[in-house]
Amino acid sequence: MKLSSSLAVIASLIHLVPTTVALVGSTWSMTNVPLTGLLDITFPMTIVEADHISGYYFAQQFNFVGIADVGYTGLQPRPDSNGQAVLHAAFSSFAAGTTTTDKNCSPGADGGPGVSCSVEWNGVYNRTYNINVKTMGNHNWVGTVIDTLTGTEVHIGSWTLPATSGGIVSSQYGFVEWYPWNGGQPSNHCAKLPYQQTIFGNPSTTHAGSVGTQALSYEYGDCVGEVAFHTEAVAYGAENNCGFRGQTGSVDVKFAMQSC
Ligand SMILES: *[C@@H]1O[C@H](CO)[C@@H](O)[C@H](O)[C@H]1NC(C)=O
Protein backbone atom coordinates (compact mmCIF):
# COMPACT_ATOMS: atom_id res chain seq x y z
CA MET A 1 0.00 0.00 0.00
CA LYS A 2 2.88 2.30 0.81
CA LEU A 3 4.43 1.45 -2.54
CA SER A 4 1.24 2.04 -4.50
CA SER A 5 0.59 5.37 -2.80
CA SER A 6 4.12 6.58 -3.56
CA LEU A 7 3.68 5.41 -7.15
CA ALA A 8 0.49 7.46 -7.29
CA VAL A 9 2.41 10.48 -6.02
CA ILE A 10 5.09 9.93 -8.66
CA ALA A 11 2.42 9.57 -11.35
CA SER A 12 0.82 12.84 -10.31
CA LEU A 13 4.19 14.61 -10.18
CA ILE A 14 4.91 13.47 -13.72
CA HIS A 15 1.95 15.52 -14.84
CA LEU A 16 3.25 18.57 -12.98
CA VAL A 17 6.40 18.81 -15.07
CA PRO A 18 6.85 18.52 -18.82
CA THR A 19 7.28 14.96 -19.99
CA THR A 20 10.87 14.03 -20.77
CA VAL A 21 10.07 13.35 -24.42
CA ALA A 22 9.12 16.96 -25.17
CA LEU A 23 11.68 19.28 -26.76
CA VAL A 24 11.18 22.74 -25.39
CA GLY A 25 9.72 24.06 -22.16
CA SER A 26 8.85 27.50 -20.87
CA THR A 27 7.53 28.64 -17.51
CA TRP A 28 4.63 31.06 -17.21
CA SER A 29 3.71 32.88 -14.03
CA MET A 30 1.09 35.34 -12.86
CA THR A 31 1.34 37.87 -10.06
CA ASN A 32 -1.32 38.69 -7.46
CA VAL A 33 -3.23 35.40 -7.70
CA PRO A 34 -5.73 34.92 -4.84
CA LEU A 35 -5.43 31.77 -2.68
CA THR A 36 -8.67 30.57 -4.24
CA GLY A 37 -7.11 30.76 -7.72
CA LEU A 38 -7.97 32.61 -10.92
CA LEU A 39 -11.38 32.36 -12.57
CA ASP A 40 -9.89 32.84 -16.04
CA ILE A 41 -6.56 32.87 -17.84
CA THR A 42 -5.63 33.62 -21.44
CA PHE A 43 -2.56 32.19 -23.19
CA PRO A 44 -1.60 33.99 -26.43
CA MET A 45 0.05 31.64 -28.92
CA THR A 46 1.40 32.21 -32.43
CA ILE A 47 2.55 29.40 -34.71
CA VAL A 48 4.86 31.67 -36.70
CA GLU A 49 6.02 28.86 -38.96
CA ALA A 50 5.54 25.11 -39.06
CA ASP A 51 4.95 22.58 -41.80
CA HIS A 52 1.28 21.88 -42.41
CA ILE A 53 1.53 18.34 -41.09
CA SER A 54 0.49 16.65 -37.85
CA GLY A 55 3.13 16.06 -35.18
CA TYR A 56 3.81 19.23 -33.20
CA TYR A 57 1.92 20.13 -30.04
CA PHE A 58 2.39 23.65 -28.67
CA ALA A 59 0.88 23.51 -25.20
CA GLN A 60 0.37 25.40 -21.99
CA GLN A 61 -0.29 23.53 -18.74
CA PHE A 62 -2.19 24.86 -15.73
CA ASN A 63 -3.08 23.62 -12.26
CA PHE A 64 -6.16 24.15 -10.13
CA VAL A 65 -6.29 24.75 -6.39
CA GLY A 66 -6.91 21.39 -4.69
CA ILE A 67 -6.18 19.25 -7.78
CA ALA A 68 -2.77 17.61 -8.36
CA ASP A 69 -3.24 16.82 -12.05
CA VAL A 70 -2.78 19.48 -14.71
CA GLY A 71 -4.93 20.75 -17.48
CA TYR A 72 -3.46 21.36 -20.95
CA THR A 73 -4.46 23.60 -23.78
CA GLY A 74 -2.72 24.37 -27.03
CA LEU A 75 -2.49 24.24 -30.79
CA GLN A 76 -1.34 21.65 -33.32
CA PRO A 77 -0.76 21.96 -37.09
CA ARG A 78 -2.80 19.75 -39.41
CA PRO A 79 -2.61 19.08 -43.17
CA ASP A 80 -4.35 21.69 -45.33
CA SER A 81 -7.86 20.89 -46.47
CA ASN A 82 -9.28 22.22 -49.77
CA GLY A 83 -6.31 24.55 -50.04
CA GLN A 84 -6.90 26.11 -46.63
CA ALA A 85 -4.78 25.80 -43.50
CA VAL A 86 -6.25 23.76 -40.64
CA LEU A 87 -5.30 24.05 -36.98
CA HIS A 88 -6.28 21.75 -34.13
CA ALA A 89 -6.90 23.15 -30.64
CA ALA A 90 -6.89 20.93 -27.55
CA PHE A 91 -8.25 21.47 -24.03
CA SER A 92 -7.78 18.61 -21.55
CA SER A 93 -8.01 17.77 -17.87
CA PHE A 94 -5.89 14.97 -16.43
CA ALA A 95 -7.82 14.94 -13.14
CA ALA A 96 -9.73 11.79 -12.24
CA GLY A 97 -13.41 12.59 -11.74
CA THR A 98 -13.54 15.25 -14.49
CA THR A 99 -16.84 14.99 -16.37
CA THR A 100 -18.18 16.41 -19.61
CA THR A 101 -21.33 16.61 -21.71
CA ASP A 102 -19.61 18.63 -24.46
CA LYS A 103 -19.75 17.13 -27.95
CA ASN A 104 -16.11 18.17 -28.58
CA CYS A 105 -14.95 16.16 -25.56
CA SER A 106 -14.45 12.53 -24.59
CA PRO A 107 -13.41 10.69 -21.45
CA GLY A 108 -9.69 10.05 -20.81
CA ALA A 109 -6.49 12.01 -21.44
CA ASP A 110 -3.33 10.43 -22.87
CA GLY A 111 -4.54 6.99 -21.79
CA GLY A 112 -5.21 8.06 -18.18
CA PRO A 113 -8.13 9.61 -16.31
CA GLY A 114 -9.54 12.99 -17.27
CA VAL A 115 -11.33 14.50 -20.26
CA SER A 116 -9.94 15.54 -23.67
CA CYS A 117 -11.56 18.11 -25.93
CA SER A 118 -10.51 19.26 -29.37
CA VAL A 119 -11.66 21.19 -32.40
CA GLU A 120 -10.26 21.80 -35.87
CA TRP A 121 -10.86 24.96 -37.85
CA ASN A 122 -9.33 27.02 -40.64
CA GLY A 123 -6.75 28.58 -38.35
CA VAL A 124 -4.07 30.82 -39.80
CA TYR A 125 -0.31 30.39 -39.36
CA ASN A 126 1.60 33.39 -38.02
CA ARG A 127 -1.53 34.76 -36.39
CA THR A 128 -1.83 35.20 -32.65
CA TYR A 129 -4.62 33.22 -31.03
CA ASN A 130 -5.70 33.87 -27.47
CA ILE A 131 -6.53 30.58 -25.80
CA ASN A 132 -8.95 31.46 -23.04
CA VAL A 133 -9.70 29.12 -20.12
CA LYS A 134 -12.47 30.33 -17.83
CA THR A 135 -14.94 29.01 -15.33
CA MET A 136 -18.69 29.26 -15.81
CA GLY A 137 -19.10 28.48 -12.08
CA ASN A 138 -19.79 25.16 -10.33
CA HIS A 139 -16.28 23.87 -11.23
CA ASN A 140 -17.14 23.97 -14.94
CA TRP A 141 -14.35 25.22 -17.25
CA VAL A 142 -14.53 26.24 -20.90
CA GLY A 143 -11.69 26.49 -23.42
CA THR A 144 -12.00 28.94 -26.34
CA VAL A 145 -9.64 30.04 -29.12
CA ILE A 146 -9.98 33.70 -30.02
CA ASP A 147 -8.50 35.09 -33.24
CA THR A 148 -6.79 38.32 -32.16
CA LEU A 149 -7.13 39.84 -35.64
CA THR A 150 -10.81 39.11 -36.39
CA GLY A 151 -12.17 38.48 -32.89
CA THR A 152 -13.70 35.19 -34.11
CA GLU A 153 -14.12 32.68 -31.28
CA VAL A 154 -13.86 28.90 -31.67
CA HIS A 155 -15.19 26.71 -28.86
CA ILE A 156 -12.71 23.95 -27.95
CA GLY A 157 -14.67 22.23 -25.19
CA SER A 158 -15.78 22.25 -21.58
CA TRP A 159 -15.52 20.00 -18.56
CA THR A 160 -16.36 19.92 -14.88
CA LEU A 161 -13.71 19.26 -12.24
CA PRO A 162 -14.32 17.53 -8.90
CA ALA A 163 -16.05 19.72 -6.29
CA THR A 164 -12.81 19.90 -4.26
CA SER A 165 -11.24 22.10 -6.96
CA GLY A 166 -10.65 25.85 -6.92
CA GLY A 167 -9.34 28.31 -9.48
CA ILE A 168 -6.13 28.33 -11.52
CA VAL A 169 -2.87 28.68 -9.59
CA SER A 170 -0.08 31.15 -10.36
CA SER A 171 2.43 29.25 -12.52
CA GLN A 172 3.06 26.20 -14.67
CA TYR A 173 4.98 25.17 -17.79
CA GLY A 174 4.35 25.32 -21.48
CA PHE A 175 6.02 22.89 -23.86
CA VAL A 176 6.69 22.04 -27.48
CA GLU A 177 6.63 18.38 -28.38
CA TRP A 178 6.88 16.34 -31.56
CA TYR A 179 4.39 13.73 -30.37
CA PRO A 180 5.08 10.97 -32.96
CA TRP A 181 8.26 10.37 -30.93
CA ASN A 182 6.50 9.84 -27.63
CA GLY A 183 6.64 6.07 -28.05
CA GLY A 184 10.46 6.14 -28.15
CA GLN A 185 12.81 6.62 -31.08
CA PRO A 186 16.28 5.56 -32.25
CA SER A 187 19.35 7.69 -31.69
CA ASN A 188 19.22 9.34 -35.13
CA HIS A 189 15.80 10.96 -34.70
CA CYS A 190 16.79 14.47 -33.55
CA ALA A 191 18.18 15.42 -36.98
CA LYS A 192 14.77 14.52 -38.50
CA LEU A 193 12.86 17.11 -36.50
CA PRO A 194 10.77 19.44 -38.72
CA TYR A 195 11.26 23.18 -38.26
CA GLN A 196 8.92 25.17 -36.04
CA GLN A 197 8.84 28.70 -34.75
CA THR A 198 6.29 29.72 -32.15
CA ILE A 199 5.67 32.57 -29.75
CA PHE A 200 4.25 31.80 -26.33
CA GLY A 201 2.71 35.11 -25.27
CA ASN A 202 2.56 36.48 -21.74
CA PRO A 203 -0.62 35.12 -20.12
CA SER A 204 -3.32 37.51 -18.90
CA THR A 205 -6.39 37.36 -16.69
CA THR A 206 -9.33 39.58 -15.84
CA HIS A 207 -8.29 39.42 -12.16
CA ALA A 208 -7.38 42.95 -11.07
CA GLY A 209 -3.69 43.67 -10.58
CA SER A 210 -2.40 40.36 -11.98
CA VAL A 211 0.41 40.49 -14.53
CA GLY A 212 1.50 37.43 -16.51
CA THR A 213 5.00 36.63 -17.74
CA GLN A 214 6.22 33.95 -20.10
CA ALA A 215 9.88 33.15 -19.41
CA LEU A 216 12.41 32.34 -22.12
CA SER A 217 12.13 28.80 -23.43
CA TYR A 218 14.69 26.10 -22.68
CA GLU A 219 15.54 22.75 -24.22
CA TYR A 220 15.02 19.45 -22.49
CA GLY A 221 14.51 15.80 -23.34
CA ASP A 222 16.78 13.64 -25.45
CA CYS A 223 17.50 16.10 -28.31
CA VAL A 224 19.19 18.86 -26.27
CA GLY A 225 21.88 20.53 -28.37
CA GLU A 226 20.84 18.64 -31.52
CA VAL A 227 17.84 20.53 -32.93
CA ALA A 228 19.19 24.06 -33.59
CA PHE A 229 17.15 25.43 -30.70
CA HIS A 230 16.84 29.19 -30.29
CA THR A 231 14.82 31.37 -27.94
CA GLU A 232 14.53 35.10 -27.42
CA ALA A 233 12.26 37.55 -25.67
CA VAL A 234 9.77 39.41 -27.86
CA ALA A 235 7.55 42.33 -26.94
CA TYR A 236 4.63 40.17 -25.80
CA GLY A 237 6.25 36.91 -24.71
CA ALA A 238 8.96 34.43 -25.68
CA GLU A 239 9.85 33.15 -29.14
CA ASN A 240 11.37 29.74 -29.68
CA ASN A 241 12.35 27.76 -32.73
CA CYS A 242 13.95 24.41 -33.42
CA GLY A 243 14.21 21.73 -36.06
CA PHE A 244 15.15 21.64 -39.72
CA ARG A 245 13.25 22.71 -42.84
CA GLY A 246 12.45 19.83 -45.18
CA GLN A 247 12.38 17.14 -42.48
CA THR A 248 9.22 15.18 -41.78
CA GLY A 249 10.10 13.67 -38.41
CA SER A 250 10.01 10.13 -39.73
CA VAL A 251 12.94 7.87 -38.90
CA ASP A 252 14.37 4.78 -40.54
CA VAL A 253 12.71 1.83 -38.82
CA LYS A 254 15.52 -0.56 -39.81
CA PHE A 255 18.00 1.76 -38.08
CA ALA A 256 15.66 1.86 -35.09
CA MET A 257 15.76 -1.93 -34.80
CA GLN A 258 19.56 -2.04 -35.16
CA SER A 259 20.05 0.56 -32.46
CA CYS A 260 17.91 -1.26 -29.93
C1 LIG B 1 4.98 36.69 -39.43
O1 LIG B 1 4.41 37.97 -39.27
C2 LIG B 1 5.39 38.97 -38.98
C3 LIG B 1 4.70 40.26 -38.62
O2 LIG B 1 3.37 40.29 -38.98
C4 LIG B 1 6.31 39.10 -40.17
O3 LIG B 1 7.28 40.07 -39.92
C5 LIG B 1 6.98 37.76 -40.43
O4 LIG B 1 7.76 37.82 -41.59
C6 LIG B 1 5.95 36.66 -40.59
N1 LIG B 1 6.64 35.39 -40.62
C7 LIG B 1 6.31 34.41 -41.46
C8 LIG B 1 7.12 33.17 -41.36
O5 LIG B 1 5.39 34.49 -42.25
Image: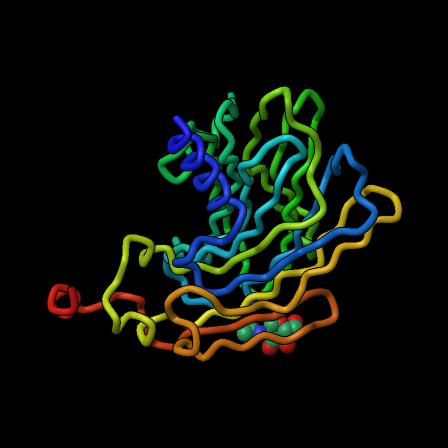
Residue shown at the point (64%, 43%) measured from the top left: 153
Q: Is residue 41 left or right of residue 229?
A: right
Residue nearest the viewer, comparing 236 with 10: 10
Q: Which residue, as the protein is rendered here, is positioned at the far front?
A: 2
Q: Is residue 59 left or right of residue 65?
A: left
Residue 177, located in which quarter of the rendered image? bottom left
Residue shown at the point (41%, 67%) measured from the top left: 51
Q: Which image quadrant: the C terminus? A: bottom left
What colouring method underlies this structural image? rainbow
Picture coordinates of residue 110 (x, y %)?
Answer: 39, 40
Disc count in the image?
Answer: 0
Residue nearest the viewer, comparing 134 with 29: 29
Q: Is residue 210 left or right of residue 55?
A: right
Residue 23, located in which quarter of the rendered image? bottom left
Say if residue 61 shows up in the picture: yes
Picture coordinates of residue 124 (x, y %)?
Answer: 55, 59
Residue nearest the viewer, comparing 103 with 218: 218
For ligand 1, give the image quadrant.
bottom right
Picture coordinates of residue 254 (x, y %)?
Answer: 11, 67
Residue shown at the point (59%, 54%) measured from the top left: 173
Picture coordinates of residue 89 (x, y %)?
Answer: 51, 46
Say if residue 83 shows up in the picture: no
Residue 232 position (above or below residue 149): below
Residue shown at the point (69%, 57%) measured from the top left: 149
Q: Which image quadrant: the N terminus? A: top left
